[in-house]
Image (cartoon, helix red, strand yellow):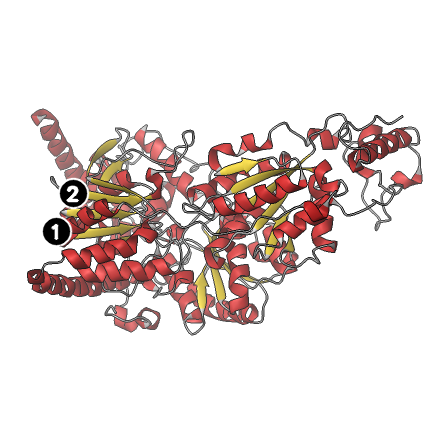
Amino acid sequence: MPEKSPRMAVSRRRFLGTVAVAGAASAVGDLDNKALAAPAQPVAAKASALAPSAKMAAAETSAPATEAPLMGTPTSDFMVDVIKTFDIDYVAANPADSFRGLHESLLNHGGNKKPEFLTCMHEESSVAMAHGYFKIAGKPMLMLCHGTVGLQHASMAVYNAWCDQVPIVIIGGNDLDAARRPPLVPTYHSAQDIGALLRDFTKWDDMPVSAQHFAESFVRAYQLSMTAPYEPVLLSLDSGLQEEPLENRDKLKIPRYVPTSPPQGDSNAVREAARLLVTAENPVIVADRLARTPAGMGLLVELAELLNAPVIDQRNRLNIPTTHYLHQTGRGKVLIHNADVILGLELSDFYGTVNTYIDNGENTRFPKTKAGVKMISISSRDFYLKSNYQDFQRFQPVDIAIAGDAEATMPALIEAVKKALPADRKAALEKRGEAMRKAWAETRARTLQAATYAWDASPVSTARLAAEVWAQIKDEDWSLVSSDRMISGWAGRLWPMEKHYQFIGGPGGYGIGYGSPAAVGAALANRPHGRISVNIQTDGDMMYAPGVLWTAAHHKIPLLNVMHNNHGYHQEVMHVQRMADRRNRPLPNGPIGTQITGPNIDYAKLAQSMGWWASGPISDPKDLAPALKRAVEVVKAGEPALVDVYTQPR
Amino acid sequence: MQSIKLASILSAAAVAVALTSTAAGAASAEHGKTLFIQKGCWECHGTQGQGAVTGPRLAPDPLPLEAIANFIRNSTGPMPPYRREILSDADLGDIYAYLQSIPKPQAVKDVPLLNQWASKPK
């Protein structure tokens, strides 16, 4: 006899638990039943794995064919109603039974529109897709997963999003009622508190236990996620709650979402910062995640031009056009050294900005700055961080610390600078501006000269790679949806990046496995705008979860993937070499364990197998142009394309 | 401290003498190219010593042999010193010969792909 549900007289959960147990028992007693046999397949080789146990087979294969139809509206339909009050275009997920109720409601009740389901092959990819998507679209994607094994897969990508201050609304399915949930697999996949896994690097999580609770928690989750500093949030969603019939729909209320204004820095502190900036002889502005929205870049340009102060862009966002005369990133070292005032805007590592560290076995450190330099910080990190993970970096004392969102504080700072600027500074500022224009041109000349070295080399130089790609996209509306850190920054050093979507920074937490899925997510956000999305894709990162290639093909997401295939986890190649040299011990066979050779991976075939147009590998730079040209045509036609290039290490 | 500096200078001088005689003798650019890969130089500097964010450019027109040798033997920077046990003077000389053999690149004006961008800022 089934047990009586302690919560509801009519309980979907009670019913399902009964069916599952009964089904399992039935299957155990009828192992030879043809219903357990696999569907007809082409002639297959003899299975090499052990057959599953009867219990396992039953749990994995018993179909809910005898379920009675649910009376009334499922609670998950209401959950979809809640979700639909937001402008959420997509939900990324690898399917899992712990959210099957919501999944079905999204398709049937929601019509698979806003949000539309994106079939993902790894939860890490789901999150990283949402990560890249936000940095173009400016709004969160929803992500669904198993609350246990799915979140375990997803956790690294969530940490990246946390470090990169990117909002993602994550729903983890969980089956809380131990007395009711099906045995074996669903019970393995349940936990008391799934939020514990991510709590160190999510802004907020909750476990709603009723429909009304879900409505309020979802709105709160979205609102907190989208309040600066943006961060991922998590809802633990009981599978039983999803599947229960809804009661009193007319009494349920979906709270209205009102975006929270970002926190602005204290006006007195802003005035003091302005006073320091206008009187400085060599002010330097350093920006990292300042440009939280597309408006950020324009605000920084306005401030920099008022002061004619050089800007060092640390490039976790595109903070200033690379063509602007005050974009002086290439001169960062000398500018920091000569600065008398440094303004740091949303720096993830102020300490590292003004101090040198040398990995020479003695951990040598010394200031990059001269004595007496004044430092100003405007950062949301001054009022929001967590303890365990060390993404807040080493502590750096500054002269003025302004807790606030830097972009939201910029208008006030601009006004304060205008008021504080003495009239007699005009000539000095103009002179500084001319010096900056000259310095920009000199840096450009040096950069071009540097690009000539190894120009015809095979493997292909990373400068040549960047120049060849540019030649094929320069007449298009393009968007670089990857970091260029692994190609010595050549894209940023050469390409004119002037729009916020033309560069979106990197993973945030430097967790590998971000690049490929984030690019797919960003390309999805670029798709309605008809932009050519370009991803310079490292080989090691690609192999973390290459199934995202299938997702891109399946959902017809146009993306140009150019493989930066240097055949290794190159950072680690150098680290192991460094250890050997430091210890005075040779590596007769190279840094074993860091290289991706023997066999070489054929990325073109890998992509082709998942529905991509692909070409390569290419090792002669003369072969690049025709392959890239054809690939761009494919992308313009709305499909993904990949060109595999054997490259220099960096 | 003075004695350390003196030792360093003497060491560098000895290396330079040894390398100069090696380079003047049978230094092999071809062997040096192989060593440049085997010893891991390419990892940070690129296969043609062109440089990257991970290591400075070494070629073409490498610094004088004495300067490079002194740095390789006595580096205190991110690149650890390569001692004779893992890089002999003869091998170092061959690597230097390889760096010397790398031709100068074309001028920027002669590379169409490097003339796609404005030379002045906005």
Give whichever of discs 2 and 1 has the lower sequence position.
Answer: 1
Instruction: Specify whether residue A391 is in view.
Output: yes
Residue at the spot 69% in from the left edge and 52% down from the top edge = A106
Q: Is A489 situated above or below A203?
A: below
Residue for badge 2: A374
Q: Chain of mark 2?
A: A
Of A596 and A152, nearer the camera is: A152
Label 2, label 1: how far apart the Cα atoms are: 9 Å
Compared to residue A112, the image places residue A589 above or below, namely above
Q: Farthest front residue?
A: A251
- Marks 2/1 in contact by CB < 8 Å: the verdict is yes
Q: Position of residue A84 (x, y in %)?
A: 62, 54
Q: Is residue B104 visible?
A: no
Which residue is at the front of the view, A615 or A257?
A257
Residue placed under numbered mark 1 in the picture: A280
Specify whether A530 is left or right of A121. Answer: left
